[in-house]
Image (cartoon, rainbow, N blue to C red):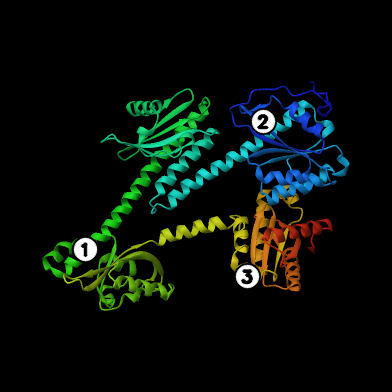
Amino acid sequence: MSETDLLFTTDDAAPARAESLARPWTILIVDDDPEVHAATRLALLDTRFQDRPLAFVSAFSAAEARARLPTLRDVAIILLDVVMETDDAGLALVRFIREELNWQATRIILRTGQPGSAPEHDVILQYDINDYKAKTELTQTRLFTTVVVALRGYRHLINLETSRAGLRQVICAASSLHRTRSLDLFAEGVLLQLTAILDTQAHSILCTHRRHNGSVTVLTGSGRFAGLSTNPDDLDMEVRERLTATLALRRHVFGAEYITLYLPTPGDREVIVYIESGRPLTELDISLLELFGHNISIGYDNLKMWQQLEDANLLLERRVAERTLLLTESEADLRRFKSAVEHSSASILITDVHGVITYANQAVLETSRYGLDELLGNRASLFKSGAMPDQLFSVLWDQIRSGKSWRGELLNRRKDGTLYWEAVTISPVANATGTITNFVAVKEEISERKRLEEELRRLATTDPLTGTLNRRSFFERSSSDDFRRQHQGNAAVMMFDVDHFKSINDTFGHAAGDAVLAAIAAICRATLREEDSVARLGGEEFACLLPGVTPTQARLTAERLRTAVAEHAIVLADGRQIAVTISVGLALFTQGDDTLGTVLNRADGALYLAKKHGRNCVRQN
């Protein structure tokens, strides 16, 4: 068929072909004209992308599509008619897909035989679609081009999400080294990252090998190797031979459709990653794998060292408790162990059964900044900051008095009033008759670790440019049970964005646009209440949750914010000033609202009305 032959006028039957073994790309056709379905299948019959065929699913109305969509998985493209049961049936289905199913990666291509019923300019602006075509302009070649471009975009989005999942696994392993499964999470994250790098569903294994005793351990596997035991004998002979050859050569081995990475670590271990890619590897694939492999070996060795350090710390705590008992019974033992305890980097504190301090080593003095004469004879509660709940200390005392050790984290106060965090293990010491005579506390300052944890929490919940909540944190805060119980029916949501923001970026540059967004966030913090939650949802769009307000109060708040922005001149780094305005959409919570998304949709509609009526105004829905 030539490019001038209209696709939707053909009646040829599609030739039969063998089912491909490759996983197909799923394309959903939603149109009330059966001929459109037949013509589309015929035109794309032999199309393959990335060596994968196409698989078609048909729905002959928007209602049928709405019912079938939740049962489908990995739908790459939806070819969607606009006018079906109603003039806007296709457009309503777009909102259902994006907002209720939350399918953001699926590419939606609108096809219409009546362009006038849904003008392209309005549809592109108001609906989250990826292309808009009139059926009369879709030749076979143009349909092929449109579908391949959409598949490429879908593939890129899926690859990005796969890469993020791998990074989350690796970051999770790095931030949870104290957990026994942190090494497993690191290994799983490595294989996920390899899948993303190769852009294919690879079959892979991650193994470790000790240089001295020759033992090989399988840490994890993916694809056909998923769920394997740690014993390499469970692998088939060909894979075992490839692993053995790599260890003997002590270098990477590249096969036609497989690669074995040899990754020596600074310790006495070797890491081997075996990957069956299912396709020939390019030079870029190999370069990326070698670069990534270097990071794997360093990360693995660090994880092993952390685990050894954790084991050593637990062993140290146990030995200190045991040796402290000997200190109270023997002067000879006291002289032998005193030097080790005194010079330990860990803070070691001994009290009697009433909590009165009888011993503190040098690390305690350096950390707390008290002198030894100020501590001896005082109770250990001297370090209390008042920020920890009394219940915690009740549990602590009950536990150690019962003969058990207590472990936890305490926020303490130094002599100069500054606060610091400590990881604390308190163990009871008993005499020969089993009577508890003392308590030994082994402490390590972890203020920096706590600060990093707090910084990670902040980065996970706030927008880095404006300092407001990010989209995820905003939805989590407003969906809590406490919020629903206390504020539903007595709260409001504002959505607002910057008028003519694109013009600001085009005229003054993106740095100026960033300055405008940061200034508006500062105005929000100065204008709104402490209990109000402000979030940047994306681009120049913000949302604000107003708990515990009446309709009148919500309206006054929206007007006050709009006025504050309009009256504020934003000064750029080069001294120029920009006057900006915002359009505000307001919606109130009602008893029938199940989620924040429902109210936010109404606020979004009100924002659309505000822009439609000239901008720099407030509209309520």
Tell me the quadrant of the picture where the N terminus can be found.
top right
Which label is found at residue 322?
Answer: 1
Q: Earlier in the sequence, mark 3 or mark 2?
A: 2
Residue where numbered disc 2 is placed? 54
Tell which residue pokes out farthest to the left in this image.
Answer: 332
Which label is found at residue 236?
Answer: none
Residue 156 sits in quarter = top right
Tell me the quadrant of the picture where the C terminus can be found.
bottom right
Residue at 26% across, 36% down: 213
The Cα–Cα distance between marks 2 and 1, rounded to whole angstroms, is: 69 Å
User: Tag 1, which secondary structure?
Assistant: helix
User: Tag 2, which secondary structure?
Assistant: strand
Which label is found at residue 485?
Answer: 3
Residue 124 sits in quarter = top right
| Labels 3, 1: front one | 3
Question: Can the viewer see residue 229?
Answer: yes
Q: Residue 2 or 42: which is nearer the viewer?
A: 42
Q: Residue 349 or 390: which is nearer the viewer?
A: 390
Q: Earlier in the sequence, mark 3 or mark 1?
A: 1
Q: Earlier in the sequence, mark 2 or mark 1?
A: 2
The Cα–Cα distance between marks 3 and 1, rounded to whole angstroms, is: 52 Å
Residue 25 is situated, as x and y percent measured from the top left of the image, at 65, 33
Direction from residue 20 to residue 33 in the image, left or right: right
Residue at 85% across, 37% down: 113
| Labels 2, 1: front one | 2
**Amino acid type of the residue that numbered disc 2 sits on in the rendered structure:** Leu
Residue 412 is situated, as x and y percent measured from the top left of the image, at 38, 70
Direction from residue 23 to residue 340 in the image, left or right: left
Q: Is residue 507 above or below residue 617?
A: above
Residue 12 is situated, as x and y percent measured from the top left of the image, at 79, 23
User: Tag 3, which secondary structure?
Assistant: helix
